[in-house]
Image (spheres, coloured by chain):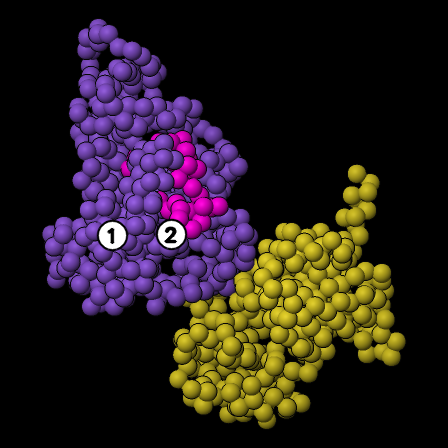
Amino acid sequence: MAFSPKHLLGIEHLSPTDITAILDLADTYVDLNRKEQKHGGALTGMTQVNMFFENSTRTQASFELAGKRLGADVLNLAMGASSIKKGETLIDTAMTLNAMNPDMLVVRHPNSGAVDLLSQKVKCAVLNAGDGRHEHPTQALLDALTIRRAKGRLHRLNVAICGDIAHSRVARSNIFLLNKMENRIRLVGPQTLMPSGIDKFGVEVYSDMNEGLKDVDVVMMLRLQRERMDGGFIPSEREYYYRWGLTREKLANAKDDAIVMHPGPMNRGVEIDGDVADDINRSVIQEQVEMGVAVRMAAMDLLAQGLRTRRREAITV
Amino acid sequence: MKILLTNARIIDPEAGTDEIGAVLIEKGKLAGIYTGNPNLDFKVDETIDCMGKCLAPGIIDIGVKIGEPGERHKESFKSAGTAAACGGVTTMVIRPDTEPAVDGPETLEFVFRRAVSDAPVKVLPMAALTKGRKGLEMAEIGFLKDAGAVAFTDCDHVVTDNKVFARCLTYAKGLDALVIAHPQEPMFSRGACATSGPLATKLGLPAVSPIAERMQLQRDLALIEMTGARVHFDQLSCAAGLNVLKRAKEKGLNVTAGASIHHLTLNELDIEGYPTFFKVKPPLRNETDRVALADAVASGLIDIISSMHTPQDEESKRLPFEEAASGAVALETLLPAAMQLVHGEYMDLPTLWRALSLNPAKLLGLDTGRMAVGAPADLVLFDADKPFILDRTQLHSKSKNTPFDGRRMQGRVMRTFVSGKEVYCG
């Protein structure tokens, strides 16, 4: 297998071949997950620890399910409630866990770069489940798989990423991934939610949503991250909905067969109209959730293979 | 005691010269400076052959943080003083941002006592401009000045209340006290730990535009113009600020400015991968700003280079970038890092030393910092070209948070003299 890194920390350092390898393997796990007997054996006997320093329901559940279906022992640690509150540093927590010999560490942390830091201190494979505003690689991969299955390809598509780009790790990972696979990316949203220098990332920036959605194949909505805003970035939610909320009228600018995506959880009536979100002909939001489990299984499978190879080599040496 | 230093490359920042010659030290002062082919046929107690290496006035470093009082585990007068001696720094001008802040004559007296007993180099304290560095009430500037405070600053706490700051400036002006200001708009830079731009966006770090520097400079300059106070800006870091400073100087305002060695030798690309030893305040800028800053030192627009020595223990740096403490130690790395500016051909040695010793001395009204007969024999003898790889564990500071760890550097201190007494010999 071409893809055998130690960790999955971000999309930035993956090659198009790596991405394709993960997605191809994920396709097989989609089939497995649709069977009644859902067990694979890639992680049999391994221990997976989910450390979420930020609240999460869906991502954590997705990783837990992925690990269990691959045969791992899965331990969920709600970090918000435990040692961090007692003043233990991130590295000490990591060292403690390291001593328990886990094989996979799935980490979400509110600070950018925190997962990189942690990966330098532990012996196991680390999966970034979202760090601050930096990256959320498995989300970008599951989005890619959803697009590839819906559109039949993952290149030469016009993709509009809409909303709160500034606070979004999902947007950053998706920009890297879609660019690597040679798609045209448009970013749509208020200027206050566009991070500085974003025009250098190979994207086109639009303030006007009708213009930005013109003839696109994929409309990717982002959640308005109310908890990450330290000041007024927008005057009100109703004005946001009026200008940048995805409604049927605005969606009419896109291609007739354009798909609508959202990483969830949705703020209905803020960034997306409930009607559009539930439209089974356009919305692939439920598929995204399904692909999420498969992509995470694929990523952990590949990391486990890498881990086994490295351990074998260590013994031989 | 007479010491003769022969065969030295004498760096004179005042005359702008760099010539081979000899220097005579007598009773702690420079008793003679000889260039050309002088007759050195007199009796001395000790002769040191400098072997053609550089002999310059000792560095006067404005803005050194010592952990006393409050954080002695990070740095003490003894450890900082030793580091300074090893780095060719003969006078440390220390910051009042301690715990508690040096904002009254009692704390200042404690600092003096500790400094005199423990540090092998000269120590001059600065004091807070407002009580507790809170920006609400003026500190006892008069008492503090009489007790030996050489300047008044709240360090990185900006006095945001314009009325309070204007009164501080007016009062300081009346006592001819020097005020040191920190030109970063604090509301605008709130929470930021990087300079805004594509890199900060990619890393997902909260960032601030360098315009924050220009904004604060402009506010401060307006009040300086109104009050006529004498003000030094501790660190400028970007081209946007330099333009404003240039206009203010042309206008004849009584202002000077400094730059930290890190902003002169590193740029924002160094924070790729989130190494927290590169987290400084203000954040590292892009390469265009760094070059503009180095050019400004060469032209004299920036008057002073300082280390902004800020010791932080391992625990406060072993954290995610956003949560890690800011600052870097630099007393020992100041000279080799500054030599990058000479080796990189931004300036010659006398020009560099104008910023390292002469200008700081002039700013504080000190008789040291120059190569002149009668001045205190505060000297550094160094090899300008000697290459080495920095190993942070070898630093003498209690804290080892240097961004230069593992870096190839050029320029090494051989001996340091304070008032004619050798305090370091490498």
| Quadrant showing the N terminus of chain B | top left
Task: Read off the residue under disc 2.
Answer: B98
Magenta segment, which residues?
B59-88
Q: Is residue B330 left or right of residue B318?
A: left
Q: Are marks 1 and 2 on the same chain?
A: yes
| Quadrant showing the C terminus of chain B | top left
Q: Nearer the viewer, residue A311 or B425?
A: B425
Q: Is residue A56 magenta?
A: no
Q: How far from the left and from the top, in percent, is residue A10?
A: 61, 61
**For the residue labelled by badge 1, is the local secondary structure a helix, a strand or a loop?**
loop
Task: Read off the residue under disc 1.
Answer: B152
Who comes first in sequence, dot 1 or dot 2? 2
What colour has chain B? purple
Q: What chain letter is assigned to the residue under label 2?
A: B
Q: How far from the left and from the top, in percent, is residue B63?
A: 32, 46
**Image quadrant in which you'd find residue B245:** bottom left
Q: How far from the left and from the top, in percent, is residue B194?
A: 43, 59
Chain yellow in the figure, letter:
A
